[in-house]
Image (cartoon, rainbow, N blue to C red):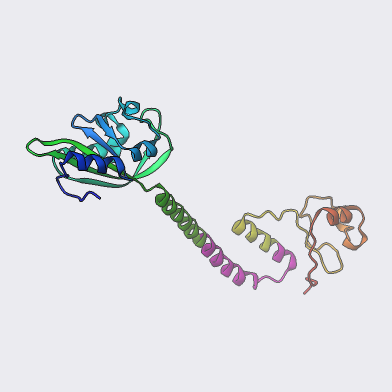
Amino acid sequence: MIRESQHMMNEDGFFQAFFDQSPCAMQILRANGTVLKINKAWEEFWEQSSVADISFYNINSDKKAQAMGMTSAFKQALAGITASLRNMKYTLDADTAGTGGVRFLNVRMLPLVREGKGVEGVVCILEDNSKNRFVELEKEKHQNRLKEEITRRTKQFESLLQFSAEILTINDPTEVFEFVTSWAQSLFGLDYSSLLLLEKNGKLVLKDVIGFSRSLIDTFELQTGEGLAGLVAQTQQVAVTENFAT
């Protein structure tokens, strides 16, 4: 690998072999920001076949590169100083060439120095860190959801403690039912407006809760399976409790 320093090997043969065979996606940028050369790994990375595919490209006019700090890193390398960027979010489109959607890149800009001539260009090395970054983002998302759920459940638990203390002070079964349904709606967003409070013998205790007529409610008996009782038995889940009478 190339060490982080202000200078690179200037032996043409050695550098050319390293550049062409490197598993890292690399390109050489001229001092004016245009592309001089790309290696095989770069072609595979961006799905480009040659420099001709990006002959129009100039890093100085790439707004995405500017936003990511790559343009500043390029200028820093032109000044002879190695620059590095991590987890740069880059979205591909027709203006920037290549395919692959959103990627997270680790970028290194190295000055290309020739003895006696100074910096002639910049070598840009890319590492695709997308897989690791997406895992990190997914982990962060789950952690945030967990925090939100813990906060929500904590508030519910605190409310339930208050509910438990208050319900002990209520003796009337009708008031108990109304109190429970009201709390259930406020805590969990559940609508119990169609529930019926029944005694063990199947008679209605809570009146006018579902909007039916007085006569239907007064004659309601679950065991008969007729009329309103039959309708409720067919369409509702019924739980039998102990007699609420005190």
Extent of the magenta region: 152-177
Q: Nearer the viewer, residue 237 or 123?
A: 123
User: Is 87 positioned to the left or the right of 28 in the image?
Assistant: right
Residue 165 vs residue 85, the one in the foreground:
85
Pinpoint residue 87: horizontal percent, then vertical percent.
34, 47
- Residue 108 place in picture, x, y as percent: 25, 45
| Count of numbered circles in the view | 0
Residue 167: within the magenta? Answer: yes
Q: Quadrant of residue 96?
A: top left
Question: Does residue 208 appear left or right of residue 148 in this picture?
Answer: right
Q: Is residue 118 above or below residue 233?
A: above
Predominant SS along the magenta part? helix
Q: Position of residue 165 (x, y in %)?
A: 60, 72
Q: Is residue 120 left or right of residue 126?
A: left
Does residue 192 appear in the picture of this structure? Answer: yes
Quadrant in the rendering for residue 117: top left
Instruction: Pick the quarter of the image with the C terminus.
Output: bottom right
> What residue sits 28% from the left and 43% below the top?
125
Residue at the spot x=39%, y=42% of the render?
A: 103
Res 73 seen here = no
Residue lying at the far left in this picture: please name it.
116
Q: Residue at x 32, y 35 (%)?
A: 64
Residue 186 sits in quarter: bottom right
